[in-house]
Image (cartoon, coloured by chain):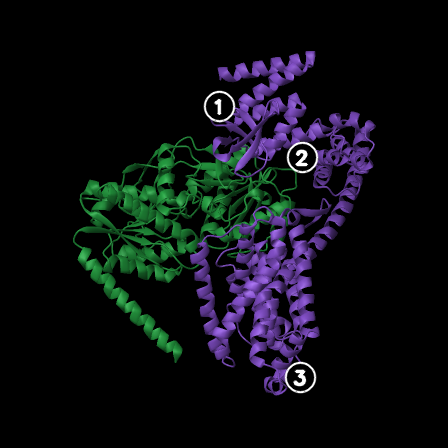
Amino acid sequence: MIRFFQWMLLISLIVTSSLVNAVAANQDDTLEIAVALLQSKSFNEKVKAIEVLETNGGEQAKILLNALLDNRVFYIKKDKRLVVGGSQDKEYSVSDALTGEALGTLHRGQLQKITLNNKMRRQIRSALAVMNLRNPDAEKRLAAVNQMLDRPEEEQAQLLEPLLAQERNDRVRDAMQIVIALSNLSSDKPEQRMNAVTALEGNIHPAVRNGLSRLQRETRDPAAVKKIAQVLETIDHKLRLYSLLENLFFGLSLGSVLVLAAIGLAITFGVMGVINMAHGELIMIGAYTTYVIQLLMPEHIGVSVLIAIPAAFIVSGAVGIAIERGVIRFLYGRSLETLLATFGISLILQQTVRSIFSPLNRSVETPAWMSGSWEINSALSLTLNRLYIIAFALLVFAMLYLVLKKTSLGLQVRAVSQNRSMARAMGVRSQWVDAMTFGLGSGIAGVAGVALSQLTNVGPNLGQSYIIDSFMVVVFGGVGNLWGTLVSGLSLGVANKFLEPWSGAVLAKILVLVFIILFIQKRPRGLFPQKGRAAEG
Amino acid sequence: MSTTNSRFKTSLLGAATAVALSAASIANAADTIKVGILHSLSGTMAISETTLKDTMLMLIEEQNKKGGLLGKQLEPVVVDPASNWPLFAEKARELLSQHKVAAIFGNWTSVSRKSVLPVVEELNGLLFYPVQYEGEESSKNVFYTGAAPNQQAIPAVDYLMNEIGVKRWVLAGTDYVYPRTTNKILEAYLKAKGVGDKDIMINYTPFGHSDWQSIVSEIKKFGSTGVKTAVVSTINGDANVPFYKELGNQGLSAEDIPVVAFSVGEEELSGIDTKPLVGHLAAWNYFMSVDAEPNSEFISAWKSFIKNDKRVTNDPMEAHYIGFNMWVKAVEKAGTTDSDAVQEAIIGVAVPNLTGGLSAMMPNHHITKPVLIGEIQDDGQFVVVWQTSGLVAGDAWSDYLPGSKDIISDWRAPLSCGNYNVKTAKCSGQNYE
């Protein structure tokens, strides 16, 4: 406790003296105190270190705060010197935390990381926001102001008002005005309060809505209450619209995942009529291929996902061809035995993966260009990975459609599936076509695995969770019809997502299943039944 | 025909193995003490349970190096219940009646424990159960070395409420018995602390749920009222990865809405890209990062046993460490491996835990443990941000559920009851399901 007071005394002394003298020497002193405090084991001490850095406000303090936030601050185990690390590999190029002087490279084992907790991270972010308010980069200033809007605190308005007059950038000005208006909502003067309400009209940021609701509860004047209620109503109206759009996006994205998982099955099951229970495992193999490719090129995570797409197609396709040549070709026309055999294969594949990669889930990193979200406004933001996957699903669908309609392989596939003996009579090597078709379907499953590796666990059980859904989509869409798969996948996704907020995730799934069962009773051939002679066989 | 043929071959092979096994066991029966290990090595639960099997093998090997137990060597008997709940009961029966094991260490899920329970009670075996669970159970033959709700869930909520100032709560869980019971206890606890209905949101999702978009967006809306909000997650292992990924992508950071999880440990994190998780919390009785002498010894022993420098240790492993040492000590104290004698001797036995304290077996067959709250770091480890000032004794019957408030468990001589109702002064016997 005494120690604590000593520190506080020292800090306050130095802070005041730095105000009086405003010389660089004292800034260095506060830095030194912060550096000493940061090495403490107690989070309370470290919190104080950040307060010191905040009051210091110098360039080096800013570097240190940024590095802390990125987990790049260490002390050297040998001499307890605090350093800022550069690259994130086993070897760190480090520089002194006090002076910024470069100290060469050190091995990870020689360094001890300074750990943070949530409170510190929050504190650092708001400290940096305050520092960034005068940053020459307009984007940085905007981010700093938005940060204040996200985490409203007192005294922000006083901080911003003098800056507002100097601000040249319109977007930053607008953001600043909203923060100021927001704090004016709790002003003593009714007139100022009502001006703020008008200024905030139509803004859908949650902080604005909260501020207005609070004011509505506290205000006595009926005219003012009416005005606030009216502003809140327009906000709520907008929010409802955006939440509808958001739900639609969620549904399409779930649907596109379903389409991806099912489209390979639409070929093997739909076109060839093989009930392939190992389809899920082919997806899993695709996901593991992504993992292996990432292991091979740890420096280029962003590119590795793109390379994984053809690689997964080839690997899963090859496994698919092997399954077809090794097992399925002996069982054509005996669907029950195919079902059992492929179920056995799925178990074998799972256990093989378990023995090679261990039963633990493997971590596949999401490349930077796929993480985060596209913020349209504070109520509607679309996550990037989902956006890419929707686009990817459509692309895969288009490619597959072209292959089946425009290439000679596609022509042969359709010929064999429509009338095998006639196709053979015309000189089509039906066995080869079977193998290629199965390979194509399996390869597409592998490609789906690449996409799923970005969304869910890469583990031996990955496939199991998608096999039922895939069959559901194919059967609902109409066996043998690619368009049916697309439409049914997307519509099941959207239906699921619109049911979910109302019924909960468990019930939503059940309701969708019940609906499909009823639908199949009415139309046994699904949404888009295949026409012609093939449908009879 | 080919199927029948291969099936025949398999059964022949199985029979041969069984004969070989029983022959081996007869040869060894005289001079070893057998220890049963009942963990799934295949199927969905293999992901978590395989590690515990290896932990047990390591502990047994170390004990043998120290000269075994009662002058005899310990012999592990490993069976694979394959994540299949009824098979757990069959395998437990096999361990007890065929292999005559002195104790079983095993199970992960509550439903597998419930399936084994009647068997160990019927054959009067000993089962050491190493995983945190929902409580509401106390069997004469089972020793619960994992956390009861008051050793994990309640302290975590206390931490969020008192240290972080959380006022709005999301209770999110996978739809099965552990999350449902835990959330029921937590809901009652929160209401007792004056939290209103509108400030609690409860959400259940199916096993392996992978599409978290709507739920995360709902949590985001629920947490945007300007009041500090936290998520208490009893989401089961596999579904966590997509959940945390979605949180990260929708921009919900731990600084705004922290998630405290009861099923996410070092092992689970080793399969996740941890960058979006930094700052989220977990409540356990042990973290690999805890700086204590026995812990660093355990970690280096584990790494050299498993011959992999990257493998991590976790809370259920510590529970096995404690449970195994308690059993060893109780057998030494009783001078025999006889089930009744060990049951009597083990109550009150205290052994070192890995966080630098002593854990003791309570009369209700639960143990005392410290409770730690850790924040996830970018290297997949936790840094302890808070811990209970002392040890917490496991409470079999929650004080916050109307049905079990008045029930206590005490397996010592005069009472000898797992569910004694203090109001009616009656013991309801073993059938408490």
Residue A63 image point, x, y percent: 64, 28
Q: Secondary structure at mark 1?
A: loop
- Mark nearer the viewer, 3 or 1: 1
Which of the chains bears the disc numbered 2? Answer: A
Is A403 placed above or below A379 here? below
Amino acid type, label 1: Asp
Image point (40%, 36%), residue name: B370
Q: Residue at x 67, y 59 (%)?
A: A392
Where residue A355 appears, as percent x and y from the top left, is 42, 57
Packing grade of label 3 (10 A; few <14, some 14-19, many >=20) is few
Q: Is residue B157 left or right of residue B70?
A: right
Does residue B83 sit above or below A408 in this rendering? above
| Label 2: which secondary element | loop
- Camera-side residue: A437 or B172? A437
Query: Which amino acid type is shown beneath numbered disc 3?
Result: Gly
The residue that label 2 is drawn on is A151
**Where on the picture, by quarter, is residue B397?**
top left
Residue to which mark 3 is pinned: A532
Mark toward the viewer: 1 or 2: 1
Q: Which lettered chain is shown in purple?
A: A
